[in-house]
Amino acid sequence: MSKHNKDIVVANAPVSYGAFEVTIGFDPNVPDGDAILDEVSAASYAGIDLGPVGYLGSTEQLGAKLAQRGLGLAGAYLELPYADPDA
């Protein structure tokens, strides 16, 4: 028996819902972090990327929010200044 798990699991990310540093707080159609966590869980994804810093919750809250929905953490998020020509 192989010690490698052959199951494929798929994660999602807040950016799939339009949530990134340029839209959060500016676009009223972007759902909040809790709504996205609920949607990702309801769609049976195994995990989620963090999205912009603090979007899915504080360091103290995040683990509980993920566990409550049966989600794992799939990756981090790095904000790059693409929208800022001076950067």
Image (spheres, helix red, strand yellow):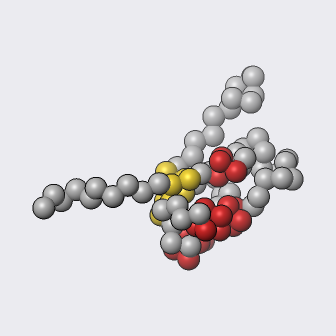
Residue located 75% across and 28% down the image? 84
Residue located 56% across and 77% down the image? 68
Extreme residue toward the left, this view: 1
- How far across and how far down the image is residue 41, in percent? 58, 67
Q: Is residue 52 or residue 7 the one in the foreground?
A: 7
Q: Is residue 72 visible?
A: yes
Residue located 78% across and 45% down the image? 23
Q: Is residue 32 above or below residue 78?
A: below
- How far across and how far down the image is residue 75, in percent? 49, 51
Q: Is residue 69 above or below residue 18?
A: below
In-image side of 67 versus 33 (left or right): left
Q: Is residue 84 above or below residue 79?
A: above
- How far across and how far down the image is residue 2, in percent? 15, 58
Total tally of numbered discs in the picture: 0
- How far across and how far down the image is residue 55, in percent? 68, 57
Q: Is residue 43 or residue 64 the one in the foreground?
A: 43
In-image side of 36 versus 63 (left or right): right
Q: Quadrant of the C terminus?
A: top right
Q: Is residue 81 above or below residue 38?
A: above
Q: Quadrant of the N terminus?
A: bottom left
Residue located 74% across and 30% down the image? 83
Q: Is residue 62 visible?
A: no
